[in-house]
Amino acid sequence: MAVFGIVSKEKTSVASSVYYGLFALQHRGQESAGIVVNDDGVFSTHKDSGIVNDIFTQKIISALGEGNMAIGHVRYGTLSTKERVNAEPIVVNHIKGRMAIATSGSLVNAASIKRELELSGNIFHTMSDAEVVSYVITRERLTAPTIEDAVSRAMDKLDGGLCFLLMSPQKLVAVRDKRGMHPLCYGIRENGEYVVADETCALDSVGATLVHELLPGEIVVFTGSEVKHITEHCDDAPERLCIFEYIYTARPDSHIGGYAVHKARRRAGALLAKAHPVEADIVIGVPDSGLDAAIGYSWTSGIPYGIGLIKNKYIGRTFINPGQDIREDKVKIKLNPIRDTVEGKRVVLVDDSIVRGTTCAKLVKLLKSAGATEVHLRSSAPPFVNPCYYGTDIDSRDSLIAAHHTVEEIREMTGADSLGYLLLEDVLKICDGAAAKGYCTACFDGNYPTEIPEKYNNKYDTKISENKG
Ligand code: AMP
């Protein structure tokens, strides 16, 4: 999921800037997208299922009109929340006014907050955390003197890895989760407009210069040309930036914690080459997120780098579709080998991660049928063995191949000639120049920074006991 916001002193076509910001963040979610434009307290909204390009035509952007602020969202639907009704931003009217909210990530205590609210008669229309957040904030707003005070008080109640943007008639409030699990930053354009986004690549896309990466727990309030930083929640919890941002989620042209994502991936490839060397003729990467690591592997091993797989640019991430049959077909539609690169060669195939094992098994087969004599599979992430509760659509241990099979079994299942994963002890070395003070590596080592969310407990208890049985 991703958010993008803009604040201008003038009334301008803020919707088109948000459109381009969201377009740059499309890799973080393709389930739905939405924009809310604020024209002096009059909110205009458009949101729908699908990708940014399909939803926002020139006509729709024009119909959203001009304003001095806007926020937008792209949604990465977890399985239970794919319906259109869960599209964000959501707009709520409450006794003290009106606000729009867009979230990025996931709360871990949404179920208990929701239950408490439902028991006191509240009703929910969506499965989105945005609605839970809006209830908590509007309740606090009843007694808080300002919207930012309400947000700050709400932070004591909200737990998990959730950043959000809140737009009131006069203010845009950006909030980073208190462990800094997800990135959030803001920049400024030459004309003085401020923009906020998960990733710096979105600032680049609208010509903004990075001003500040929000600290964990930081709240930033934008009012016209004024910017206020509220840091009272910054020491609430130790920082635990998601390491998977560097490995897979973020775009390689983004910086997180002042550190280039591309560089982190190249380093992962270099470490992988040291840990799992092999005699081969060519190193290729799985586009897009495996390419940088493949370059790192090549530079360190001395094995030439080549382009061995071409990705159809017009397809979303295959992982998004539920159902194994669809996923398998889509790999073929999405990726095609270049025979000229791989024929008669011993190939090192680098992917950023092996989750279910579907993609790499299919790719090994495709490469061999294109003439590769050997395929040596390398994952620039350690074995993915635990579900993620913080916004990644990997909520079940069941489907994680490494949770149930040894490396040798996976090698055999994927048809690779050898298999090597980034060593767990190397994972933090990929970003050791970053400003973050701590990382979440739970998907690899089970060291969760929060309680396991209650809504999942029963499901997992059942599933884990089934797996054991
Ligand atoms: P799999 O076929 O399940 O092993 O998926 C591995 C592929 O999915 C890799 O090429 C990754 O780039 C990609 N991937 C990893 N994590 C995710 C995620 N959370 N959502 C979508 N795709 C992912």
Image: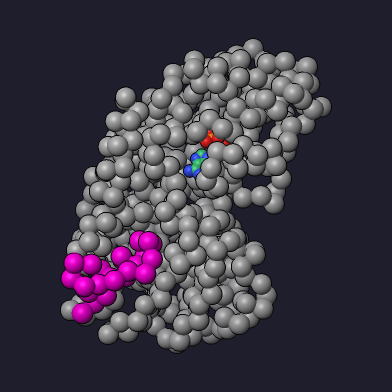
Q: Can you say whether 276 is above or below 232 in the image? A: above
Q: Which residues are magenta?
A: 118-142
Left or right of 426 in this view: 340: right
Name the dominant secondary structure of the magenta segment: helix
Q: Position of residue 301 (x, y in %)?
A: 61, 19
Q: Position of residue 204 (x, y in %)?
A: 58, 59
Q: Position of residue 341 (x, y in %)?
A: 77, 26
Q: Can you say whether 112 is above or below 450 in the image? A: below
Q: Is residue 132 magenta?
A: yes
Tell me which corner region of the image, top left, top right, bottom left or bottom right, holds residue 223.
bottom left
Left or right of 120 in this view: 321: right
Q: Can you say whether 168 is above or below 312 in the image? A: below
Residue 225 visible in the displayed image: yes
What residue sits 22% from the left and 57% below the top? 112
Q: Can you say whether 231 is above or below 93 in the image? A: above
Image quadrant holding the C terminus, namely top left
Q: Residue furthest right?
A: 340
Q: Position of residue 90 (x, y in %)?
A: 42, 71
Left or right of 300 in this view: 407: left
Tell me which corner region of the image, top left, top right, bottom left or bottom right, holds residue 308.
top right
Q: Residue furthest top?
A: 279
Q: Is residue 410 magenta?
A: no
What residue sits 45% from the left and 50% below the top? 79
State the residue in front, 395 or 346: 395
What residue sits 49% from the left and 54% below the top? 76
Tell me which corner region of the image, top left, top right, bottom left or bottom right, holds residue 350.
top right
